[in-house]
Image: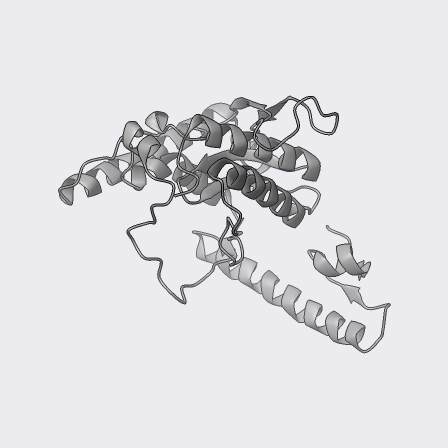
Amino acid sequence: MMLRPSVETNQVFLYCLAVAAERAGIQLHAFVVMSNHWHAVLTDPDARLPEFLHLLHRLVASCMNASLGRTENFWAAEHASVVTLESVDDVLEKIAYVIANPTAAGLVRSPEEWPGVITTRLGEHHIATKPGLYFRQGGATLPERMRIDCTVPPILRELGAETAVRRLRVLVARNIRQARSKVRDSGRTFLGADGARTMSPWRTAATPEPLRRRRPTLAARDPHDRKAALARLRVFHTAYRAALIRWQRGDRSARFPDGTYLMRVFHGACCDLAP
């Protein structure tokens, strides 16, 4: 639980998040930092998400290892989970999931009680201050304060602000109601904000993570949206494999499909333009 909430942990993650998002041009919409993982809903307009994740995770690991007096790997070695959200409903569902996550985990009765980093509504603003435990104070490379402006996801703007806020409020209330019912039916009680703060960072999660579980790359409640998205993914994989085979045979004119990252950034491969 090395991300368990504290003044120092909150400062570290918020500042590192602000730096990484600004450097990679990421638009943040919602996020929450739990005690051993984090969630976010975001938009990647410049196709630089790997750069964002790499920088964020590297900075957080360096800062938190300095804070905890350790030097080992901070993050799990497996790939980060990245899921494309296909529709308005999918985006709203995931934002509601992010907001209600501390309650769904049985930690606090409402998201507002969570003592860690969290957004509880659309369009929030946060000020992040540079942690002194890792970054050099007064250095010219990084500012002392950074601002995070959470924007409304582009796909929700067609709804209008009032409609988006109302629909999100209904979904969050539903998730909280279900979480409270689950905790009550199990005979447990919520840990509470103080319990989350005083939790040992060396404690591990009590619920084991299932092995060989599916790792989805997209989320679509509508079966037609899901079918279309999977078809696009298959087309991408087919085109990518064909281009990679040509590249491995020495053909540097091989053109990779739109969405290719590693071959484009690290090897200068030609790619189709985004629509």
Picture coordinates of residue 11, whole percent (x, y): 51, 28
Q: Is residue 151 above or below residue 253?
A: above
The number of callouts visible is 0
The residue lying at 22 percent from left, 36 percent from top is 180
The image quarter in which residue 271 lies: bottom right
- Of the pair 245 and 211, the residue shown nearer to us: 211
**Does 44 sit left or right of 163 as displayed?**
right
The residue lying at 47 percent from left, 52 percent from top is 220
Picture coordinates of residue 183, whole percent (x, y): 20, 41
Picture coordinates of residue 53, whole percent (x, y): 60, 46
Quadrant of the frame with the N terminus: top left
- Of the pair 228 and 258, the residue shown nearer to us: 258
The residue lying at 28 percent from left, 51 percent from top is 206
The residue lying at 80 percent from left, 61 percent from top is 267
**Does 145 sit left or right of 107 as displayed?**
right
**Does 209 sit left or right of 74 as displayed?**
left
**Does 259 sit left or right of 105 as displayed?**
right
Any part of residue 106 in sight: yes
Q: Is residue 23 above or below residue 136?
A: below
Any part of residue 272 in sight: no
Picture coordinates of residue 142, whole percent (x, y): 70, 28
Looking at the image, which residue sits at the far bottom? 249
The image quarter in which residue 134 lies: top right
- Of the pair 209 and 133, the residue shown nearer to us: 133
